[in-house]
């Protein structure tokens, strides 16, 4: 069986639960595409920009509740559930892999899945029959730390475990719709997204890690870092030498780029 790749998924707005979008259409076909190429994964390990902790944590609940960590949306969205099996054994395995490289994670045995995890997975694997464990993000520790987290998890792909980083390629909600009054992508968002693509294609890892110094409009693309950091975990999980493929691009409100990448 081929080794599972790792993925960086832009999870977009939770509004795709009730609205069509290019990103939702893409995610609806992604699981089948991956299954055809790599086989069905035995489990999924996902890092979400919506689980933030002071130190690394791994979620190993046996039963996963649906966490509605979004507010002021249509009531129908809070009636949608996604409850795949938990993966406590995978959580233990991931914790041990992190500990081997000196990263001692906390082990959370009760937390469910936040919307950065369950919303994209609901479209990728709608049957909710693949066990899932989650990894937290530490924004104050930066890109290099998350690259190291991913590198510690490199053995997962060979064990038929799909590793996913879930964030957004750009995430400036304050500028949605401002640039041109519609969904046409803002120039600065496109410039940032294309810089990231060229840096990934050319293996410029040091520049990516220091993206605020090197990327155009880096802080405008990410007023805070948490939605960009899962990219580094996905990159590390397949090894920095592996060049990724951009497998989707679209924009929401002009300022939110939904690029997705596959590593391996």
Image (cartoon, rainbow, N blue to C red):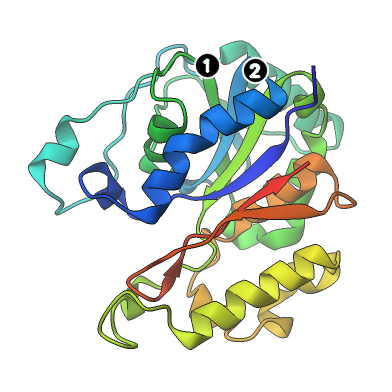
Identity of the residue drawn at 32% across and 74% down? 183
Image quadrant where residue 56 sits: top right
Between 154 and 96, the residue placed more toward the observer is: 154
Find residue 206 and name its label: none
- Tell me if residue 2 can be seen: yes
- Measured from the top left, where is residue 39 in percent x and y? 67, 19
Q: Is residue 29 left or right of residue 204?
A: left
User: Is 116 situated above or below 113?
Assistant: below
Residue 54 appears in the rendering: no
Looking at the image, tell me whether mark 2 or mark 1 is earlier in sequence order. 2
Q: Quadrant of residue 185?
A: bottom left
Left or right of 35 in this view: 95: right
Q: Please tell me which residue is depicted at 74% across the width and 43% down the height of the picture.
A: 149
Residue at the disc numbered 1: 131
Residue that appears at 90% across and 51% down: 241
Say above or below: 252 vs 233.
below
Q: Answer yes or no: do the residues labelled 2 and 1 have beta carbons within 8 Å?
A: yes
Residue 6, given in percent of the width and then of the height, sits at 70, 39
User: Residue lying furthest right in this view?
Assistant: 241
Label 1 residue SS: loop
Crowding at dot 1, Cα within 10 Å, few <14 / some 14-19 / many 20+, comes out as many
Q: Quadrant of the C terminus?
A: top right
Measure the alpha-carbon separation of dots 2 and 1: 9 Å
The quarter holding residue 42 reads top right
Mark 2 lies on residue:
90
Q: Secondary structure at mark 2?
A: helix
State the quadrant of the N terminus.
top right
In the displayed structure, 88 sits above or below 228; it is above
Residue 105, percent across and down?
67, 33
Q: Nearer the viewer, mark 2 or mark 1?
A: 1
């Amino acid at each position: 069986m081929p080794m599972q790749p790792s993925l960086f998924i832009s999870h977009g707005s939770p509004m795709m639960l009730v609205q069509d979008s290019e990103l939702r259409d893409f995610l609806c076909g992604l699981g089948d595409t991956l299954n055809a190429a790599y086989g069905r994964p035995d489990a999924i390990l996902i890092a979400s920009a919506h689980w933030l902790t002071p130190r690394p944590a791994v979620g190993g609940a046996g039963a996963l509740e649906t966490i509605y960590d979004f507010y002021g949306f249509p009531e129908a969205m809070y009636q949608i559930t996604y409850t795949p099996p938990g993966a406590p054994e995978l959580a233990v395995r991931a914790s041990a892999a992190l500990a081997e490289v000196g990263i001692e994670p906390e082990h959370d045995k009760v937390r469910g899945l936040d919307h950065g995890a369950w919303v994209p997975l609901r479209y990728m694997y709608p049957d909710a029959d693949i066990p899932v464990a989650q990894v937290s993000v530490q924004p104050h520790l930066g890109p290099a730390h998350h690259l190291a987290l991913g590198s510690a998890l490199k053995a997962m792909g060979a064990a038929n475990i799909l590793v996913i980083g879930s964030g957004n390629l750009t995430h400036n909600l304050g500028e949605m719709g401002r640039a041109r009054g519609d969904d046409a992508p803002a120039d600065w968002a496109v410039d940032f997204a294309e810089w990231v693509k060229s840096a990934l294609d050319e293996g410029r890892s040091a520049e990516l890690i220091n993206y605020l110094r090197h990327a155009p409009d880096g802080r405008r693309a990410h007023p805070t870092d948490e939605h960009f950091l899962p990219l580094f975990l996905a990159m590390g999980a397949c090894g920095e030498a592996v060049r990724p493929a951009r497998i989707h691009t679209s924009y929401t409100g002009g300022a939110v780029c939904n690029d997705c990448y596959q590593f391996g």
